Image (tube, rainbow, N blue to C red):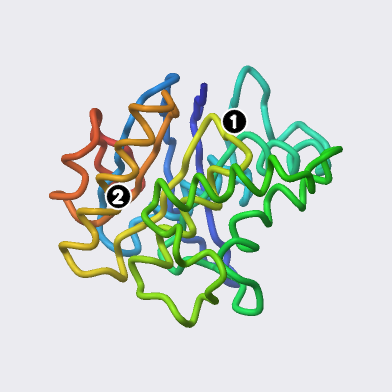
Amino acid sequence: MLEAKNIHKVYHNGKKELAVLKGIDLKIAKGDFAAIVGPSGAGKSTLLHILGGLDLPSQGEVIFQEENIYKLKDSLLSRIRNKKIGFVFQFYHLLSEFTVLENVLMPALISREPGVRNPQTKEKALKLLDRAGLSERAQHFPNQLSGGEKQRVAIARSLINRPQLLLCDEPTGNLDSRTGDEIISLIKQINKGEEMSVLLVTHNQALAEAADKIYHLRDGILVN
């Protein structure tokens, strides 16, 4: 499903270099639920963005479904991000001027697939909201939701195009422990029920225990 080969990331500030990632190797198979644990500033989000096609590595390759994604044209890489990879972020990134239902539908609308505006697509979005326990919130706006509800909307949005890989960047970082546990439980249900590969990055070792595989990011190196 996903393989990272010798990933390096170096930031430059004048003549100074800051090496954040120092040769990361990682394999995620279909249906895996893996977690990467590390303190703030360790490079977890940077690594996740590189794996998801959002940020270029300084060195190395990211192979997704047998294609080196950074050898692809921007249009093809954008399509992979839209159709095959779902993203869940710590800060939700919901669009405040759109309803909950419209936020969930947004990746489908962006894809510009023929027939995407048909009733079946809306029905799919409503079913995802129901699964997330938000069927009664479909016509609300993000500012009318709690933090946990916003994250559930973000998860539903990430699933609308039926991705094969779900990347979660500190998805419980802004939530209390009980709500955080509920979000992790929902992600685990998706992983098992859909055989969807999940990669979660977190600073919280207890949350990472929900995963089947746990890696630690230390000094730019990934340790199993």
| Position in image of residue 60 (x %, y %) | 57, 33
Task: Classify residue 224 by image quadrant.
Answer: top left
Residue at 16% over, 49% down: 205
Residue type for callout 1: Glu
Q: Which residue has dot 2 on it?
A: 219
User: What SS does tag 2 mark?
Assistant: loop
Q: Residues within 10 Å of mark 2 (few under 14, many from 20)?
A: few
Residue at 37% over, 32% down: 191
168 up-or-down from 199: above or below: below
User: How many dots with numbers?
Assistant: 2
- Mark 1 vs 2, N-terminal side: 1
Please report contact status of discs 1 and 2: CB closer than 8 Å, yes or no: no
54 up-or-down from 211: above or below: below
Residue at 47% over, 66% down: 92
| Position in image of residue 127 (x %, y %) | 51, 45
Camera-nearest residue between 140 and 176: 140
| Position in image of residue 71 (x %, y %) | 75, 31
199 up-or-down from 5: above or below: below
* Residues at marks 1 and 2, CA–CA distance in whole angstroms: 20 Å
- Horizontal relation, residue 38 to residue 164: left or right: left
Q: Which residue has dot 1 on it?
A: 61
Residue at 25% over, 59% down: 39
Q: Residues within 10 Å of mark 1 (few under 14, many from 20)?
A: many
Q: Which numbered tag is attached to residue 158?
A: none
Residue extending farthest to the left is 206
Camera-nearest residue between 201 and 25: 201
- Horizontal relation, residue 124 to residue 117: left or right: left
